[in-house]
Image: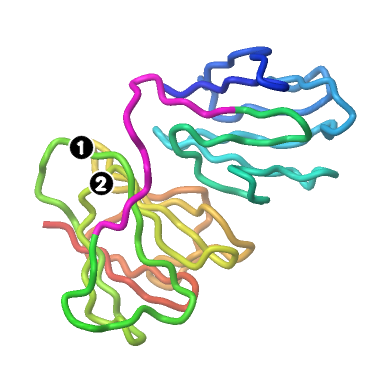
């Protein structure tokens, strides 16, 4: 379970457990997290919980939402991320203390550069060893590259254009839209919801790259 620690000038003001599917943040008193400061918009941002994942989305605020110093529109939160809104700092913590630093999980066996601007898959967290599923790149210079989904969450896509995540859960794998005005497609159909279960043979397309999901 995650929590948010809100501080101002190094002084902790409040701690909030994330227990709802949606947690709103802003200056107006009806928000779940109220920050009464003119630098904060009335409805500034929303945190969305999808399974064990927590995303933060800026609601077209006046002064923007920043994570670790970088302006974001919508992003998946990792353990120890710092959300900055005005002079306020909001640290996201996972109470089990797991280190969720993102790491690349695979390198191509032979020189095969990824499509221009396409981010290599990254992932964080781990589960007990089980036969992993994988995704196989179908087009572009990296066609044929396979990535084993050995971590809890694997992110794929092109930052600033389209980003999605594949989350490993006890009942299978779930594909979620993270960033980008255009939604990724599965088997030629645009994703209609924030997340959808993946099935063996599904073809994912985002940022111009096609990938096939394969599960043992």
Q: Name the one closer to the observer, 90 or 61.
A: 90
Q: How many marks?
A: 2
Residue drawn where x is 23% and y is 68% of the image: 107
List the residue tagged with mark 1. Answer: 127
Considering depth in this image, is 21 or 61 the residue closer to the camera?
Answer: 61
Q: Is residue 162 on the magenta stretch?
A: no
| Residue at 41% from the left image edge and 76% from the top image edge | 209
Farthest residue, direction bottom: 141
Q: Closest to the observer: 102 or 211?
A: 102
Q: Residue 171 appears in which quarter of the rendering?
A: top left
Considering only vertical position in the picture, is 51 above or below 199? above
Magenta residue span = 91-105
Question: How far across and how far down the image is residue 82, in percent?
Answer: 58, 35
Q: Quadrant of the C terminus?
A: bottom left
Would you say the residues marked 2 and 1 are in contact, meaning their CB atoms lie under 8 Å apart?
Answer: yes
Helix, strand or loop at mark 1: loop
The residue lying at 36 percent from left, 78 percent from top is 114
Residue 86 at what x, y percent from top left? 78, 35
| Residue with the mark numbered 2 | 151
């Amino acid at each position: 379970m995650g929590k948010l620690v809100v501080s101002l000038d190094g002084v902790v003001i409040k701690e909030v457990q994330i227990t709802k599917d949606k947690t709103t943040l802003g200056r107006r008193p009806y928000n779940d997290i109220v920050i009464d400061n003119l630098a904060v918009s009335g409805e500034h941002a929303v945190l969305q919980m999808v399974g064990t994942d927590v995303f933060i989305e800026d609601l077209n605020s006046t002064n923007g939402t920043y994570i670790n110093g970088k302006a974001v529109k919508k992003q998946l939160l990792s353990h120890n991320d710092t959300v900055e809104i005005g002079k306020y700092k909001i640290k996201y913590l996972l109470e089990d203390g797991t280190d969720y630093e993102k790491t690349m999980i695979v390198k191509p066996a032979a020189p095969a550069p990824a499509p221009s601007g396409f981010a290599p898959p990254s992932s964080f967290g781990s589960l007990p060893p089980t036969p992993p599923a994988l995704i196989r790149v179908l087009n572009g210079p990296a066609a044929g590259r396979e990535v084993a989904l050995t971590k809890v969450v694997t992110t794929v896509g092109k930052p600033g254009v389209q980003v999605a995540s594949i989350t490993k859960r006890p009942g299978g794998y779930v594909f979620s839209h993270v960033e980008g005005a255009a939604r990724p497609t599965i088997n030629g159909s645009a994703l209609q919801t924030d997340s959808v279960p993946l099935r063996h043979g599904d073809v994912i397309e985002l940022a111009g790259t096609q990938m096939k999901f394969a599960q043992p």
